[in-house]
Amino acid sequence: MDVRIFETAEETANALAAHVAAAIRRKPDLVLGLPTGRSPVAAYDGLQRLHARGEVDFSRVRTFNLDEFAGLDAAHPGSFRRFMDEHLFQGVNVDPSRIGFLNGVAADLDAECARYEAAIDAAGGIDLQLLGLGANGHVGFNEPGEALTARTHRVQLHDTTRRDNAALFGGEVARVPREALSMGMATILNAAAVVLVASGERKAACVRAMIQGPLTTRLPASFLQTHRNVTVFLDRPAAARLT
């Protein structure tokens, strides 16, 4: 892994935004995989600023988001689609027809997962996959367990993950859905390049295990060690336990 450490979370986010913008300038029709959560928000703000200054053009970019809660439609305040509209899509010139998203209220969720996987394949696969890092080592909604699911699938969320997403639901964990749809680990690892961002001391132990620990399904992010092109953006607190 190419590990890049910055003094502050703000510097980390600005560097990530610049990295993504440079990738789009090199390939204007980039297929871009996107995460939600707190980690990428500042980088999304940075991309909006770069777009406003005319430094990045999203008009030909194709996007696919990592995951969505089951049972929530795109207009629900807690949905990841609503999150992306508010934090990125409304601030750049992305073509709505080129936004790929899982439908959490599809009549058949398993069929929806298969549809999404086929859509990614039809787009030629993901060129650049952005990731955050869950406190328990999950990426997307690929939770720790005895085994990992390769392709887009339904998943039962761990209590830790539901707590981490409670802010989207007024801080009430009980309102966070218990099930979600997520790209699988193989879908993520099939991307041509992967970029992960993590900030804060709370992520330090997980960051060390991801980079310097063994491959284990108990820490899904550790499988990024098997990818040939991974860049990790960390602030100093998140990198504190690296040796």
Image (cartoon, helix red, strand yellow):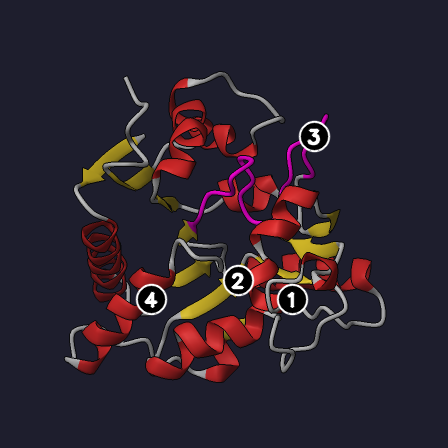
In this view of the protein, which residue sits in the foreground, 170 or 153?
Answer: 170
The answer to which quarter of the image holds residue 72 is bottom right
Magenta stretch: helix, strand or loop mostly: loop
Look at mark 2 in the image and give the residue it sits on: 65
In this view of the protein, which residue sits in the foreground, 224 or 243?
Answer: 243
Give the distance between the C-alpha atoms of the residues marked 4 and 3, in whole angstroms: 31 Å
Look at mark 4 in the image and give the residue it sits on: 44
In this view of the protein, which residue sits in the foreground, 240 or 193?
Answer: 240
Q: Position of residue 11 (x, y in %)?
A: 18, 52
State which tag comes first along the sequence, 4 or 1: 4
Q: Residue at 45%, 30% (x, y): give it.
A: 206
Quadrant where the image shows the C terminus: top left
State which tag comes first along the sequence, 2 or 1: 2
Quick check: can you spot residue 101?
Answer: no
Left or right, 91 with reference to 53: right
Q: Amino acid at mark 2?
A: Asn
Position of 137 relative to 53 (above/below): above
State which tag comes first along the sequence, 1 or 3: 1
Look at mark 1 in the image and give the residue it sits on: 102
Q: Tell me the element at label 4.
A: helix
State which tag comes first along the sequence, 2 or 4: 4
Mark 4 in CB contact with mark 3 (< 8 angstroms) = no
Q: Position of residue 140 (x, y in %)?
A: 56, 49
Q: Nearer the viewer, mark 1 or mark 3?
A: 3
Look at mark 3 in the image and give the residue it sits on: 145
State which tag comes first along the sequence, 4 or 3: 4
